Amino acid sequence: MDEPVRVMVVDDHPMWRDAVGRDLAAAGFEVVAVAASGGEALARFNASRPRVVVLDLQIPAPGGVEVTAEVIRQDPSARVLILSASGEQDDVLAAVKAGATGYLVKSASREELLAAVRRVAAGDTVFTPGLAGLVLGEFRRLSGGTPEAESDPAHHPELTERETEVLRMVAKGMSYKQIAERLVLSHRTVQNHVQNTLRKLQMHNRVELTRYAIEQGLDEPAEEPGRG
């Protein structure tokens, strides 16, 4: 039997923080810590080592973006899911660049939150509808155009053909479930391909992988010989 996912909840509003913690615990997650400020969050992160940090951006210093960056610096395998009242572009992009692998606005339902924590814990990326396109668009902008062909990981000997195929779909912002359905694979198989690719490219999460894939032009339509 799988062990419950360890989660820490960080929010300076006690009622909201307690409600999120109760919902997570009732759904089978292990809430190992709660915190009301950035300083408290970092101290308790060190002590409790959660798998997922559910984090508000607007908390007493250090703020959510700084906490995200420090959490990922201390433990690159940790996952940060932002749960914020703000859906502003600058806030979303700052959080993602700091290492957050998910971003929900607080209008999300209880079911959406629980599903997001599960997916982030499994290594997927999760964004409130409309925000995924924003993040992908910013990564494309930062990539600065078409890469040189020789840098294309499609020709990189370390990656298998299937890993490259999965990487192309990651670059398009597809979830593990969507990739599994498209390729007629199990969710676990897709997850394994992504984990193998992360290891080979020495990266830590899907946000880094997505940005890398876009920089290599893998979000562009690929030629598919033999398919009508």
Image (cartoon, grey):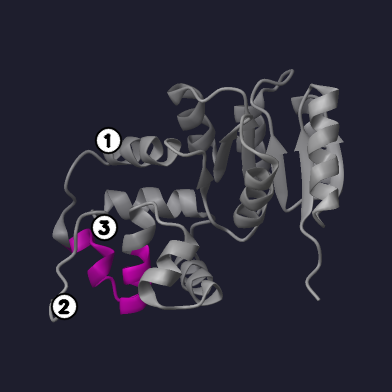
Q: At 66% across and 50% down in the image, what residue appears?
A: 117
Q: Residue 166's image quarter?
A: bottom left
Relative to 191, residue 101 above or below: above
Q: CA distance from mark 2 to mark 3?
A: 19 Å
Which label sits on residue 141? 1
From this viewpoint, is residue 160 visible? no
Q: Which mark is residue 227?
A: 2
Q: Which SS type dominates the magenta stretch?
A: helix
Residue drawn 65% across the image and 39% down it: 109
Q: Position of residue 9 (x, y in %)?
A: 78, 38
The N terminus, quarter of image? bottom right
Q: Secondary structure at mark 2?
A: loop
Which segment did they paint magenta? 150-167
Neighbor class of circle 2 (other Cα within 10 Å; few <14, some 14-19, many 20+) is few
The spot of residue 141 in percent (x, y) is 27, 35
Q: Position of residue 88 (x, y in %)?
A: 48, 22
Q: Is residue 10 visible?
A: yes
> Furthest residue to the top?
60
In the rendered structure, which disc, 1 or 3, sits on the residue that comes first in sequence?
Answer: 1
Element on which disc 3 rests: loop
- Quadrant showing the C terminus: bottom left
Q: Report if the CB atoms under discs 1 and 3 are less than 8 Å apart.
A: no
Q: Is residue 227 above or below residue 22?
A: below
Q: Residues within 10 Å of mark 3 (few under 14, many from 20)?
A: many
Q: Amino acid at mark 3?
A: Leu
Separation (CA) of disc 1 from disc 3: 14 Å
Given the image, on which type of amino acid does mark 2 rest? Arg
Q: How many marks?
A: 3
